Image (cartoon, coloured by chain):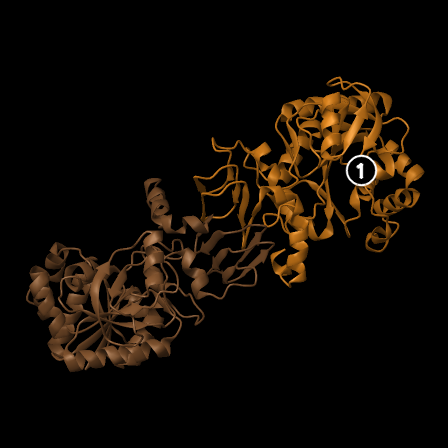
Chain colours: A orange, B brown
Amino acid sequence: MRHAVILAGGSGTRLWPASRQARPKQFITIGPKGQRLLNQAVDRGRAIAGANVTIVTVETQVAATRAVAPGVEVIGEPVGRNTAAAIGLAAATIALRDPDAVMAILPADQHVGDEAGLTRVLDQALAAVERDDVIGTLGITPTRAETGFGYLEVEAATPNTITPVLRFVEKPDRETAEHYVASGKYLWNAGMFFASARRLLSELDKHLAPTGQAVRDIAAGNVPAEEVYPTLTSISIDHAVMERVTRVVTIPASVGWDDVGSWAALPALIEPDSAGNAVVGDAVSLDSKNNVVFNDGDGLIVAVGVDDLVIVKSGDAILVMPRSAAQDLRRVVDELAKRGLSKYL
Amino acid sequence: MRHAVILAGGSGTRLWPASRQARPKQFITIGPKGQRLLNQAVDRGRAIAGANVTIVTVETQVAATRAVAPGVEVIGEPVGRNTAAAIGLAAATIALRDPDAVMAILPADQHVGDEAGLTRVLDQALAAVERDDVIGTLGITPTRAETGFGYLEVEAATPNTITPVLRFVEKPDRETAEHYVASGKYLWNAGMFFASARRLLSELDKHLAPTGQAVRDIAAGNVPAEEVYPTLTSISIDHAVMERVTRVVTIPASVGWDDVGSWAALPALIEPDSAGNAVVGDAVSLDSKNNVVFNDGDGLIVAVGVDDLVIVKSGDAILVMPRSAAQDLRRVVDELAKRGLSKYL
């Protein structure tokens, strides 16, 4: 059967203060649908897998996750151990009751403009898994020279066609990113994967054997998760498996995908007003342009005569910073922790 | 006896959103004392007049005023009619029970760095009223070429010396203000007056006769205030009386006085940090300089990498604007009203 695995392990730093340690990014309501990112991802999963949707998150967020996604199966990790362990644990858990499971693995904190288009591409990908037992990752046709994403190099990026990945490449610098986009041979690595549970576990056994064994033992209840899971290597599925498998495939797709990676990304998700202000919630901009204004509370934000700022109010915290510094929010959060202000994090 | 009259009729526009229509400037807690401006003014009055302190405010704010200044006499104006009427009403009311009253008239929304110094100057002024029945206004030795205040021209600004005012001058342009300050012959008109109640009422009779008669009739209960008071001319005591009296005096004083006229004035009242940020309440500034940050709530404001901004959170509203535009806040408030957002005003 087809399954969707939602990876909901985000830390909540890059969209602070809307995201917090106790309420990471996937809980934010953002985008035109007025839905939490997590619920958008669950709907995405249901479109391809019906009721077979499983969320993997850290134990501390299981209750909050169940509250916003009632009726969805939730697997709790004792601690976060990056995507290789999380996906392995989901694969092992699902394989126990459905040994022939094929899986689409979907991050919980992404924006997709064309959900129907994504459903078609994922259907195609899962069909290829069922037919040829391929293992792959979705490749998004780049719409800008983004330096915040990893890329997939391919021979030719023919849309909606299963294509071998020649190489995984890390986040490029500006010049390299521009070359990538101009070449037409590079795709964004969107962090969405497809594979059978069996294949995925077998690749884990080959490339990250202790994790492969551990997630099977944990899923079967043979070892206590809270003792074993924290000892696993914290490594992404890309580094641990995908880059080491000889023949990984991708499907180039244009589905209005974007990572909600920082406040600077908001204008890609929210139609900015005529002055370029991307506004979520109650806010007024006067003589102001190209600001990102986000207010998830009841009050009013008024921006007057300011440009290129991020202005966020969420809960008990307010953030004002230049858009150009939005990628740097982790440093700010670290600094707040250092100053004894962890209660705001 | 000596009396202090506190003028608390502010409208609450220039320090929005900390000041609102229903909670004007004098209710703001600001400055090193952690006291409301109104209570600071009442203490100022008590220092020269003991229990004889009277607050004049609009009827709609009488209850709120009594709540924050319990035990202080409050006179309610049916509507605001500027300072000539407000001072006249206070003088007539006080004169009924103390015909020989001498009065110091003090705005409710000002900052005084050297309260003891001000007390000495006001004592000196009231002694001159008792001795010579002078009528006058305090003259503050300018510390900058401020274009937001009116000035008093004098022959020579000898500190703490009763001096004739040659001329009242309106808010000057930058160049004129610089000339004023360089000349040493101009003082800031701080809006603090001293006179006997009898003299003040007699000057009103001379220069603004209908108001002189009306405030006496209202104080005596001969006419209904709510019918008569709204018909009075809305004019300042400066224009109505002081500029028309042949011999008005002033006392040049350096008492750390400042008008809390706009958010841009805050750095004069709050010791800025080493980066020039004037911060009130819970806020963190990182890589930021010369900002005015004001937070009268429980949460946290975080400013990162921004300069020369005003960032205010008060109640249900947040304002972000350049310091240079802070004088222009009335336009913003008008615009919010136009957009149907009066509930925030």
Left/right placement of residue A173 relative to residue B259 reads right
Q: Residues within 10 Å of mark 1 (few under 14, many from 20)?
A: many
Q: Nearer the viewer, residue A178 or B46?
A: A178
In the image, what residue occupies the spot 68% across and 52% down? Answer: A331
Q: Is residue B70 visible?
A: no
x, y (%) of residue B26?
A: 34, 64
x, y (%) of residue A2?
A: 76, 29
Q: Chain of mark 1?
A: A
Q: Nearer the viewer, residue B202 or B304?
A: B202
Image label count:
1
Quarter location, residue B21: bottom left
Quadrant position of the C terminus of chain A in the picture = bottom right
Relative to B45, say whether A47 is above or below: above
Left/right placement of residue A125 relative to residue A209 reads left
x, y (%) of residue A338?
A: 68, 61
Relative to B47, say whether A205 is above or below: above
Callout 1: SS: helix
x, y (%) of residue A187?
A: 75, 26
Q: Is residue B159 visible?
A: yes
The residue to which callout 1 is attached is A94
Left/right placement of residue B50 relative to residue A137 reads left
- The amino acid type of the residue labelled 1 equals Ile
Q: Nearer the viewer, residue A138 or B181?
A: B181
Quadrant position of the N terminus of chain A in the picture = top right
Relative to B154, say whether A133 is above or below: above
Quarter location, residue A178: top right
Left/right placement of residue B263 relative to residue A232 reads left
Q: Nearer the viewer, residue A157 or B237?
A: B237
In the image, what residue occupies the spot 84% across and 38% down? Answer: A239
